[in-house]
Image (cartoon, rainbow, N blue to C red):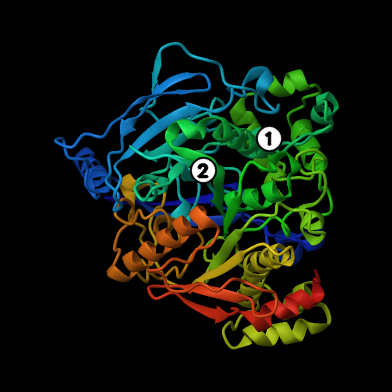
Amino acid sequence: MEEIITRKISASDVGQPVPIDLPGGHCWEMLTGFSRERWLTRRRSHLGVAAALMSAAVAVGAAEPHALHDPVSTPVLAIDGGQVEGIPSPFTGSGDARVVVYRGLPYAAPPVGEGRWRPPAPAAEWQGVRSADTFSDSCYQARHTSTFVWRREDFPVSEDCLYLNVWTPDAGQNLPVMVWFHGGAHTSGQGHSLIFDGTELASHGVVLITINYRLGPFGFLAHPLLAAESPEGSAGNYGLLDKIAALQWVQSNVGAFGGDANNVTVFGQSAGSQSVCALMAAPLARGLFHKAIGQSAACINTIPDTDANGFARGERLVKDLALSSTQAMRSAPAETLLASALSTGWESESRITVDGWVLPEHPLTTFREGRQAAVPLMLGFLADEGVELFPKNPALSTAELDAFLQQIAGARAQDLKSQYSDEYSSPGDLQHAVATDFFMAFGMRRWAEYQAAIDQPTFFYFMDHVPPAFHLYMPEQTELDLPEGPRSGGAYHSGDLALVFGNTDKVGLDWNDADRALSRHMVKYWLQFAQSGDPNGSSLPAWRPFDRLNRWTQVLDSAPRATAGVRTSRLDIMAAQWPQ
């Protein structure tokens, strides 16, 4: 049985960022004149209890569980705070090692009460052996939200959420460490989604860590009252401070799990990739990681010049709630804060801000002047990032399109238009394609150019392989009904996640041999980079380092190959208007 549900949705309903923040402070709505409000019509299936249980069994049972006659050792480990014992992973990876998972380890104190909108504090100690068998609640966020592949329904949320999860081989020492930052526009998501299960990566000899960090107004609200009480005069970026605290925890504790604290790779997608970029510019994060991977979003073209510290938006939110003190702000109900964040447009610009402490200056300035972390970098984007991620304006006129192109390309606006005209016939479609390329392709290439400029190993990729679309975060109801079939979404934003984690057998539907072949390549590339800072290995197609002359790019499909740049003529026109 099905019902058709029609409801009004807004920017916060999408699991990834709707606003496009452009250099100079131009956001999507300013450039397009198109409201973020849209109407969503979708089908909801009413599954019986038996069917729901069957779906869950298929999702969990897709990978082979550990055999009872071959138990995995789960030693009690001593870490900061006390002793912990993990559990055998319910899955088996394709690598040689059996994997133990430690779920819900506190890396900081609960940021509740007086801890709301303060830097993370050390976690409290505990007595006895802590059984690390349960994931924590997700950080506080809206539920029953999102469209397309990012749809989420109800799940436990709490402001007590600063926990991480560790997957580690049951035997091993001095292993590379990979720390994952999930996406979700810095307003949604969790590190323990099944799609991020670390068993496959850990089975090949790495320690894999995923974290939860504060989201939305809880993680990124900036306000003069909060800055006034801060010893550093800083407000906002608490979600970045959480990531820094997690990396400090890694430095102190990962050795107990067999990891090498001197070989830590941070990686993330979408908002998680923006965080990786921001941490490369953050002095407080210096030395806490040694390699970085960014997937589908940079930080150098997302923070606006206007209201860069976020105070104007923060003041609107607090005024909407009629709050006049930090005490009153910290007593406000969480759901009320979420509602005001939406109604006041707080989410309409970058959640990351220039606070003067975590980010002393705009990340663009840091990268432009070569002061970012000098670490190897691997980064890239997908062919169809804008599908369902950014809104289209079907009513856009030709004159409005030309004005938009003028801001993107200046005197070469018509040259840029001609690059897209054969492929996109309507002004709205053409604008959507240009804006997506500017935000994703241009932003990621520019990030690569800045890292290559300081002579750091840099590896750039472009994924044009088309995976099936499915509910990424709903393994119990994974099917996504697209009118033209599960691959009609193209190489969509987030389509790389299951492939990178090697989890095509745990989530989604309709995977084929080409998907699995690409996933095997990507898993090896990511692992090799974490090991050595170079994705190349003896059994892998060669990946040429990026340079600012040839812009070597690895095209990721079932047979990866190198090419001298992608979308080069389009991006070069943009670069002429936005020089380094």
Extreme residue toward the top, this view: 127
Asked whether 319 or 503 is in front, the reply is 503
Q: Is residue 45 visible?
A: no
Residue 243's image quarter?
A: top right
Q: Above or below — where is 304 with respect to 216?
A: below
Q: Residue 52: x percent and y percent?
A: 25, 42
10 Å crowding of disc 1: few (<14), some (14-19), many (20+): many
Q: Nearer the viewer, mark 1 or mark 2?
A: 1
Q: Above or below — where is 170 with respect to 289?
A: above
**Image position of 54 (left or right of 274):** left
User: Which quarter of the rendered picture does the C terminus lie within?
Assistant: bottom right
10 Å crowding of disc 2: few (<14), some (14-19), many (20+): many
Q: Which residue is mark 1?
A: 238
Asked whether 373 or 4 is in front, the reply is 373
- The amino acid type of the residue labelled 1 equals Tyr
Residue 98's image quarter?
A: top left
Q: Residue at x 55, y 58 (%)?
A: 533
Q: Above or below — where is 322 with respect to 446?
A: above
**Image position of 258 (left or right of 97):** right
